[in-house]
Amino acid sequence: MKVLALGGSVVGMHREQIPRLADAASGFDVIVTGAGPLSRYINHSTADEASKDLIGIRATRLHAQAVAVELENSNLSIPESFQELADMQERFDTVVSGGMVPGYSTDAVAATAAEILDAELYIATDVEGIYSRHPDDEDAEMLDEVSVDRLRRMTEGNSEAGGYALIDRTALDIIDRSDIPSKVFKGDPGKLEKAEECDGTQIH
């Protein structure tokens, strides 16, 4: 079983190709979508962090519906709890979800779904994988694999709403405690279709 965290940046990049994106991701059992470009509005809001999280959840659910309607046997009603998600997974080929819990990133929701379903986790982003430093840095190197402990050090200080860098600590804790097989890769439609074989970063 496979769970896909479809980063909002990926949805944003392919917003004019949602049918193609959804078709490419149809091989996953669960797809969790992010807020994408809408997160920029969240970041500039003067609201408190809890309110920003609630706005972000609504944005992710909007993207989830946009993807779900393009799939043949998927849920049109977006789950509001992990129990609903698990129940839907028994009835649909692919379940599409957005955010659920304030303070949980898209990756954390996807990691929890993978934990509940005893599934592999795939995290699709707008870069090829996880890098040793910011991908725009000319000295940055993509890592073929990385430990959870190193990722924790790399992501420290990036847990405010809409600002998750790489993978947030909650998602990492879930991956770690349940030893979830996880991979970060670029979410191009072609790579979504062969996520198991494409280049990316394995988390261990």
Image (spheres, grey):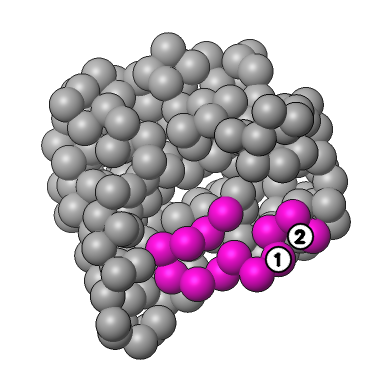
**Distance from label 1 to label 2 (Cα)?**
6 Å
The quadrant of the picture occupied by the C terminus is top right
Q: Mark yes or no: residue 79 visible.
A: no
**Displayed quadrant of residue 177:** bottom right
Q: Residue at x 37, y 35 (%)?
A: 10
Question: Given the image, on which type of amino acid does mark 2 rest?
Answer: Arg
In the rendered view, tell whether residue 88 sits above or below residue 194: below
Query: From this viewpoint, which residue is outermost toward the front?
Result: 138
Across and down, in percent, residue 79 comes to 29, 60
Magenta stretch: includes residue 162: yes
Q: Which of 6 and 180 is in front in this view?
A: 6
Element under disc 2: helix
Cβ atoms under marks 1 and 2 closer than 8 Å: yes
Across and down, in percent, residue 51 comes to 30, 82
Q: Label 2, on which residue?
A: 152
Q: In this view, does 167 lie to the left or right of 40?
A: right
* Range shown magenta: 153-165
Residues packed near mark 1 inside 10 Å, few (<14), some (14 to 19) or many (20 plus):
few
Q: Residue at x 18, y 47 (%)?
A: 65
Q: Residue 156 carries which label?
A: 1
Q: Residue at x 43, y 70 (%)?
A: 161
Residues packed near mark 2 inside 10 Å, few (<14), some (14 to 19) or many (20 plus):
some
In the rendered view, tell whether residue 47 sits above or below residue 88: below
Image depth: mark 1 or mark 2 in front: 1
What's the magenta bit mostly, secondary-structure-wise? loop
In the rendered view, tell whether residue 97 sits above or below residue 52: above
Across and down, in percent, residue 47 comes to 29, 84
Q: In this view, does 95 lie to the left or right of 70?
A: right
**Displayed quadrant of residue 1:** top right
Q: Residue at x 59, y 41 (%)?
A: 121
Across and down, in percent, residue 68 comes to 22, 39
Element under disc 1: loop
